[in-house]
Image (cartoon, helix red, strand yellow):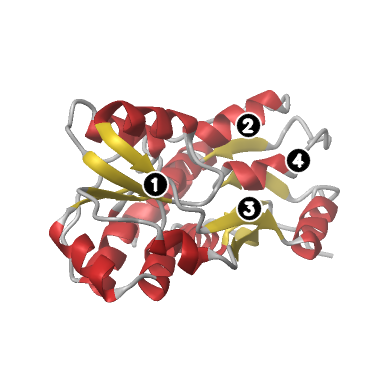
Amino acid sequence: MGVSTRKWVIIGTSNTVKRIVELCAYAGIEADGYPLVVARENPDIREELRRLGYVDTCVFTSRRAVELVYQNSSEDFKSNIRRCAVYTIGPSTTRRVHELFNAESTHPNVDYSSTGLVKLLTGRILGRTALFSSVKRSEILVDALRMYSQVLYEPKLYDLGVDSQVASRFIESLENSYIRGLVFTCSTAATIMGGTSVDSSIRIVAMGPRTLATLSALGYNSLIPTHSTVEGVVKLIVELEGSNVSEHLGRK
């Protein structure tokens, strides 16, 4: 009877989980994904966006926010976005802005998180600003935008929830001895842990500062990558796996 290979378990939003699992496979590391975080669209989203007047600055914190604004806003507002200053949380969101709005945007160089956005926006005069994100907004980002904006609009686009069936399967998986480590890609994913007991040999990784804070508040000691990106997470996993895996990655 063979011995099961110890795997990493990736928990969070579907796109991010998928990308981390794929890069882990490329690096010769086995990983299972649990895309248990789901976006629930506000049924009144069109009315939320209709209330917005002209804005000088738009801030997008996710690809989903870009897509929902594009699908539910007027042609006049889409034209406004093409003319205003646009900031995003990272390159994936920047690409989506360009694809849908044909607009240029700016994102942090390496820290693709709310903290990175705050550093990017520090000291800028933003004027009338619209923050497009889930309703679970980063307090440090909101505080910074209020400081640098004449007025800040916070339309309610969508909320992040948990798929209970996927969450149950994940919690059941914690009883298995094959888990090498857990990666939480967002704070919503981390909240499902509650007081769940985790074997001391299992390494826990938080993708960004908010997720780290959530896990810490729940009593878990966790690590965070140097850069809050998919690549940063996989790089940390490779380092934790040791030099043999690093050599394998270098040969690819």
User: Between marks 3 and 4, how big is the CA–CA gap?
Assistant: 11 Å
Q: Earlier in the sequence, mark 4 or mark 1?
A: 4
Q: Quadrant of the N terminus?
A: bottom right
Dots 3, 1 in contact, CB < 8 A: no
- Which residue is under mark 2? 214
With 56 as the anchor, is 242 left or right in this view? right
Q: Secondary structure at mark 4?
A: loop
Q: Secondary structure at mark 1?
A: loop
Residue type (three-letter) at the residue carrying disc 3: Ile
Quadrant of res 193: top right
Q: Earlier in the sequence, mark 3 or mark 1?
A: 3
- Which residue is under mark 4? 193
Q: Which mark is residue 26?
A: none
Dots 2, 4 in contact, CB < 8 A: no
- Which residue is under mark 1? 229
Residue type (three-letter) at the residue carrying disc 1: Thr
Position of 50 relative to 183 (above/below): below
Q: Secondary structure at mark 3?
A: strand
**Frontmost residue, 102 versus 216:** 102
- Which residue is under mark 3? 11
Q: Secondary structure at mark 2?
A: helix
Determine the residue positioned at 56% across, 36% down: 211
Residue 172 in the image, given as x and y percentages of width and height = 85, 54
